[in-house]
Image: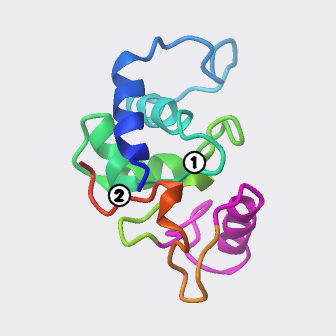
């Protein structure tokens, strides 16, 4: 299984914070949100990571805090928050919703990138990088 979580940690640790989507914009975000967005920007198309792995990559112990930062992500699609799923390898939430049209949109965005989910909502192919622990 590809370990995208390790890749996020390495990229985050070595990242030079330039060319951030917010550079040159009047959109403000907290240092924590910027760290989340920087880490999530490193998840390539066709891959996913977990809220817990992103939290670990930025030195945070709260996957829920990562979810809250992504809920208000003003930089989509440059910050691809749809590529972050739960540690149970389910979709989780999207744009503040855990069901309905918003979650179906997340599923469609991931499907367009080749990441599919079973009928029960779990990641179909774990080679896309979903990992059940933050490392």
In x, y percent, where is residue 125? 54, 68
Q: Nearer the viewer, residue 127 or 60?
A: 127
Residue position for label 2 = 64
In x, y percent, where is residue 122? 50, 78
In x, y percent, where is residue 44? 60, 40
Is 50 within the magenta?
A: no
Give the quadrant of the N terminus: bottom left
Residue at the (54%, 40%) spot, across then down: 43
Residue at the (32%, 54%) spot, across then down: 52
* Within-10-Å neighbours for mark 2: few <14, some 14–19, many 20+: few
Tell which tag, 2 or 1, sits nearer the viewer.
2
Magenta part of the protein: which range?
90-115
Quadrant hosting residue 14 = top left
Which element type, helix, strand or loop, lies under badge 2?
A: helix
Is 91 within the magenta?
A: yes
Q: Nearer the viewer, residue 43 or 23?
A: 43
Identify whether 114 is placed above or below 10.
below
Mark number, residue 72: 1
């Amino acid at each position: 299984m590809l370990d995208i979580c390790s890749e996020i940690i390495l990229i985050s640790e070595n990242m030079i914070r330039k060319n951030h989507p917010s550079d040159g914009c009047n959109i403000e975000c907290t240092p924590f949100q910027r760290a989340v967005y920087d880490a999530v920007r490193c998840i390539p198309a066709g891959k996913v990571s977990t809220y817990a792995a992103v939290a670990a990559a930025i030195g945070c112990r709260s996957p829920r805090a990562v979810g809250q930062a992504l809920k208000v992500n003003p930089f989509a699609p440059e910050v691809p928050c749809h590529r972050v799923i739960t540690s149970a390898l389910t979709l989780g939430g999207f744009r503040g919703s855990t069901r309905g049209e918003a979650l179906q949109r997340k599923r469609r965005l991931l499907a367009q990138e080749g990441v599919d989910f079973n009928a029960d909502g779990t990641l179909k192919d774990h080679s896309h990088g979903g990992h059940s622990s933050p490392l």
